[in-house]
Each structure stands twice: as structure tokens, then as C-alpha cells.
């Protein structure tokens, strides 16, 4: 007989379309690479501030000193890039402000723009199921944010200048949260956080470095909704992330 937590996990994985692989993948050890890849990323590039910042931008050095309240207020009124023109609401981020886990997507979609919260709608539901499958929950030791805080028109990818303009906010969020592990959701998040172009397939399964914080890469939930065959890979990535977190926590304990 399957107990309730196992049944809950099976239900969630079935919804992700990967239920048959759950026990196989969970039982497999996850290999860790010997050393992190070096990374610069849009966050590192944001300091020092660009030589010609947009006229309405708050200087990155000022953002670097903000507390949560000041940062939220600054984002809410931001007009530093063209994305402010069509937004209904900024989407700051949500969750535990002292979380060990930080999940970063690319930018708000229509539902997020309407509600002011990242990852709502179908992609958000899948992300919540992915979190639950590894015993995590939105808001409990988990923070969720995006590369840009305003919706790109037509759900296109953020342009490099837009990501660059918004980077100081995410950089400050990361500095305030101090997560143990960042999970980049999709290529846009990964290349902006790491500062180099690469395919998702080449970035998966490795620990990267995002300004001193370990980072792993997996697919964006919206992509997974369209691409059934990659859901199994996403599950492998989640297992890798969990194993990476265990090792990071063990290393922290050993150092104290
Ligand atoms: Fe400002 Fe970021 Fe919105 Fe651009 S996307 S207007 S930088 S908050």
C-alpha cells in the first residue's frame, strides 16, 4: 500500500509527465563535478554601472545599499528600461527572504503581469509541482524571481539591454537572500546569470558559479509544458540540485 506522501509525490510527478522515472532517477547517485565553472554574468557586469545608464535608472551603487523595503519601492517605480511602458505591474519576486533555494526565471508573462507575482498560471503550477516533488514549497526556504521585473511584450525574451538594466535589482535580492543554491530556469536565466552563451544541454548537470554562489541549470517550466520528452531531463536536474544542496549543507556543517 502506498502511503500518503508517496502518493502525493506520484501524483505530482505524473502531472509533470515523468512518474515512471521517479524511482529509477531517485535511486541513481548524482555525480558532482570537481570544481565550479567560473562565471561573470549580467549580475557581475552590473558593477560598476554601465558607462551610459538609462536616464531614469537608479545607480547600481545606490541599489547595492538598499534594504528590502527600499528595493521593492525602487522596483515598483522603475522606468529604467522600455519594458515599463507596457507593464501593468512590476513582478518583484516572492518567497522566503532568507531562503537556501533561489529559482530564477526569465521574466513575467501575462498572468504574472496581472497578478504581480512570478510563476503563476500553468507554468507556475508546474513549478510548484516540481518544487513539491523535491519536498520544497513556494515561500518556505524558497525564493522565486526573474531576470527582468516587467513583462516583455508578447512574452518575447528580454533583450540584453533590458536584462542589464534590471540586473542590479536581482543582484541586490541575491545579496539580501544569500541563497545556498541558485536554480536557473531556462536558457535566458542561465546565460544572463553566467554571462556566457551556451546551450541548456551543455549547462545541465554541472555546478556553475554565480558571483560565488553555486548555480545549476534546468529547463523553464513553460518550455516543459510544450516539450514532454524533456520533463524526464528536468527531473534529473532536480535530483542533481537536491544532491548538490545536500553536499553544500554538509560542507557548511563540516566547516563549523
Ligand atoms: Fe525597471 Fe527592470 Fe522593469 Fe526595466 S524590467 S523597467 S529595469 S524593473
Image (cartoon, rainbow, N blue to C red):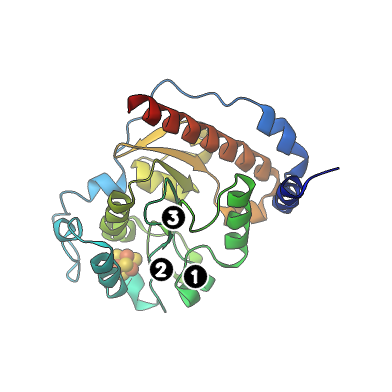
Instruction: Provide the secondary structure element on which disc 3 rests.
Output: strand
> Given the current orientation, which residue lies at the most extreme top position?
34
Whether residue 105 is visible here, answered yes or no, is no
Q: CA–CA distance between discs 3 and 2? A: 13 Å
Residue bearing mark 3:
143
Q: Nearer the viewer, residue 48 or 135?
A: 135
Q: Are marks 1 and 2 in contact (CB under 8 Å)?
A: yes
Which residue is depicted at the point 30% across and 60% down? 166
Instruction: Provide the secondary structure element on which disc 1 rests.
Output: helix
Instruction: Provide the secondary structure element on which disc 2 rests.
Output: loop
* Residue 4 appears left or right of 47: right
Which badge, 3 or 2, is on the more N-terminal residue? 2
Residue bearing mark 1:
112
Q: CA–CA distance between discs 3 and 1? A: 15 Å
Which residue is depicted at the point 74% across and 37% down? 21
* Residue 90 appears left or right of 185: left
Q: CA–CA distance between discs 1 and 2? A: 7 Å
**Percent position of residue 211, x then y:** 29, 40
- Against 66, is 136 above or below? above
Amino acid at each position: 500500500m502506498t502511503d500518503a506522501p508517496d502518493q502525493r509525490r506520484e501524483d505530482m510527478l505524473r502531472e509533470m509527465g515523468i512518474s515512471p522515472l521517479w524511482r529509477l532517477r531517485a535511486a541513481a547517485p548524482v555525480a558532482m563535478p570537481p570544481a565550479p565553472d567560473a562565471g561573470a554574468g549580467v549580475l557581475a557586469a552590473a558593477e560598476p554601472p554601465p558607462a551610459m545608464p538609462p536616464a531614469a535608472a537608479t545607480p547600481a551603487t545606490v541599489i547595492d545599499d538598499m534594504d528590502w523595503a527600499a528595493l521593492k519601492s525602487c522596483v515598483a517605480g522603475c522606468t529604467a528600461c522600455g519594458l515599463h511602458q507596457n507593464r501593468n505591474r512590476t513582478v518583484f519576486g516572492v518567497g522566503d527572504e532568507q531562503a537556501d533555494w533561489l529559482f530564477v526565471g526569465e521574466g513575467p508573462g501575462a498572468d504574472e503581469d496581472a497578478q504581480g507575482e512570478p510563476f503563476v498560471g500553468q507554468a507556475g503550477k508546474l513549478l510548484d509541482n516540481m518544487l513539491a516533488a523535491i519536498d520544497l514549497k513556494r515561500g518556505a526556504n524558497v525564493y522565486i524571481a526573474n531576470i527582468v521585473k516587467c513583462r516583455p511584450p508578447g512574452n518575447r525574451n528580454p533583450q540584453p539591454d533590458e536584462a542589464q538594466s534590471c540586473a542590479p535589482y536581482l543582484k541586490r535580492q541575491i545579496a539580501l537572500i544569500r541563497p545556498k543554491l541558485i536554480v536557473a530556469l531556462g536558457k535566458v536565466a542561465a546565460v544572463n546569470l553566467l554571462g556566457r552563451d551556451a546551450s541548456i544541454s551543455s549547462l545541465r548537470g554541472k555546478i556553475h558559479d554565480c558571483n560565488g554562489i553555486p548555480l545549476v541549470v534546468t529547463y523553464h517550466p513553460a518550455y516543459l509544458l510544450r516539450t514532454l520528452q524533456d520533463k524526464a531531463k528536468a527531473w534529473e536536474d532536480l535530483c542533481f540540485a537536491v544532491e548538490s544542496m545536500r553536499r553544500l549543507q554538509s560542507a557548511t556543517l563540516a566547516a563549523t
